[in-house]
Image: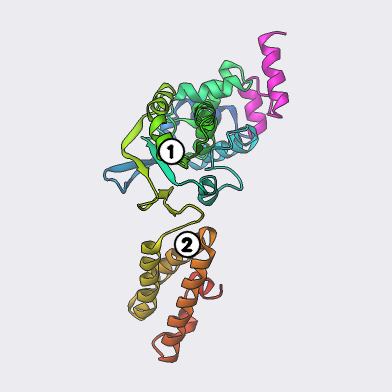
Amino acid sequence: MTDKSKKSYLLQLFSLPILNNLEDLSVCTHFSKKILYRLSKFNSKHYARFSIPKKSGGNREILCPSLEMKAIQVWILRSILEKIQVSKAATAFRPKTSIAQNVDQHLGNQYVYCLDLENFFPSISYSKVYTIFNTIGYIPHVAHILASLCTCDGKLPQGAVTSPALSNIICLRLDNRLNAYVGAKNISYTRYADDICFSALSDSRLWGIRNTVKRIIESEKFVINKQKTRMQGPTGCRKITGLVFNKDSYGVGRKKKRVLRAKIFNYISTFTSMSPDVQLKTAQHIHGWISFLNSVDSQGCQQLTKFSKIVFNQAVVAKKIDPAKIPAPFLKVLSR
């Protein structure tokens, strides 16, 4: 079997579109060859760049693809990337997975060892992306075009439609190696994007894996963020991907609930002094938090919803607020 035949077989095996040249890609995507060439050749010109502050300090660069680039990336995502299997340990960027499911896999364990991969998306190079497309069956020329459409300045852009799925595919070997190593030691492992977590019944097991884990991660060309590496036990506050974790349960934590409770109270108390724009944006913010809380702590969500109704009804009775002027997002909070 020739190399070309092998690649064609792989594409058919994974039910992936057969692409032998730019013409085939043009037919499948309904983009002209000229547009596809321009997008792949001059990819950096088709992103808007802006920065957002990091919680830990500094800024994170976000690259927002143009409408044309986004459209072709959506096609690549739906037609190719979503058909490629990734590790079950990868709990982000997959259908029917969430932060809650990431924590679920650690329930029952007492000790947690968490670490963070530094500059996660930008640390994934064009060559890694090219290798993925070539390995799954695309000839070098087509693999180059696809990789160029998914990268910018030679790396995976944070903000591209295809970046999350590609990161999981590229991390498959990392996930498998770490899972095999710690699984034999009765240690649980998950990775939520750049957030890696191990848990066990005893801290000695976790202390014993650190050096080998570091070597495996570095051999896969990732860098550990030393400032975000932490060992947590039952005597302190344990967090996994932002959720406060106990042996048999998890949630957003008392502090976060108190903050949200205060926001709800202040929103109702100062509603009439806000501009309509601020009223809407604050309502959307509160609704988003309540929805998230419901997904990870339904009991806590019910308590806050009940509190919202009590404070709101008191304000209505005192004629301090007009129910007809309440934005729809906050009405959804009250109607839970």
Q: Nearer the viewer, mark 1 or mark 2?
A: 1
Prevailing secondary structure class for the magenta stretch in the rendered image? helix
Please name the amino acid that badge 1 sits on: Asp
- Where is mark 1, residue-wise? 194
- Determine crowd level at label 1: few under 14, some 14-19, many 20+ residues with C-alpha closer than 10 A: many
State the image coordinates of residue 10 (x, y, percent, origin top left): 69, 21
Please name the amino acid that badge 2 sits on: Gly
- Where is mark 2, residue-wise? 288
Give me the residue at 37% from left, 78% from top. Answer: 271
108 and 132: which is toward the camera: 108
State the image coordinates of residue 255 (x, y, percent, origin top left): 36, 63
* Mark earlier in primary sequence (1, 2): 1
Question: Does the magenta-highlighted stretch encompass residue 20?
Answer: yes
Whether residue 37 is visible: no
* Magenta span of residues: 1-29
- Examine the rendered structure and indicate whether residue 318 appears above or below residue 183: below
Give me the residue at 52% from left, 71% from top. Answer: 302
Residue 180 bears which disc, if any? none
- Examine the rendered structure and indicate whether residue 126 appears above or below residue 288: above
Asked whether, in this view, residue 325 is left or right of residue 143, the answer is left
- Examine the rendered structure and indicate whether residue 27 appears above or below residue 322: above
